[in-house]
Image (cartoon, rainbow, N blue to C red):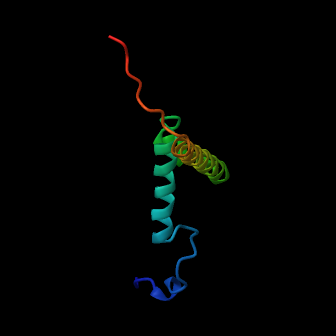
Amino acid sequence: MEAPSLRHFLLGSTFFGFKPEDRVRNHESLFHLIWFGDGRWSWHDVYHMPVFLRSFWIDKCNEIKSRQEAAIQKSKTRTKSQPSLPPTKRPR
């Protein structure tokens, strides 16, 4: 019996899968969702979460993070614009 011809395998990859650069980006998004999720999800939960739901939660986490940063910036500018009161002497 002859070895099978390699002619059948010249089509290239027909399986839907991630490119190497997509794999890195996918795992980075998994990591960020777990890290910024503050323990709300496990690796297993996030890995098996449907993509549309994972994208939704990533967007929500980004939105919350940007609101927090804006609030921090606002408080910093507020404290800079308020005049500081001189220290008062306490009577002994």
Can the viewer see residue 48? no
Q: Name the spot of residue 79 as percent of width and height, x first.
A: 52, 41
Nearer to me, 74 or 33: 74
Q: Name the spot of residue 84 as percent of width and height, x first.
A: 48, 37
Q: Residue furthest top?
A: 92
Q: Name the spot of residue 66 as percent of width and height, x first.
A: 59, 50
Q: Residue furthest left?
A: 92
Image quarter in which the N terminus is found: bottom left
Nearer to me, 78 or 51: 78
Can the viewer see residue 75? yes
Q: Report the residue at 45% width, 86% height from top.
A: 6
Question: Is 77 positioned to the left or the right of 43 in the image?
Answer: right
Image quarter in which the C terminus is found: top left
Nearer to me, 28 or 1: 28
Relative to 19, say whether 32 is above or below: above
Question: Is 62 positioned to the left or the right of 26 in the image?
Answer: right
Q: Name the spot of residue 52 as percent of width and height, x first.
A: 67, 53
Q: How many marks?
A: 0
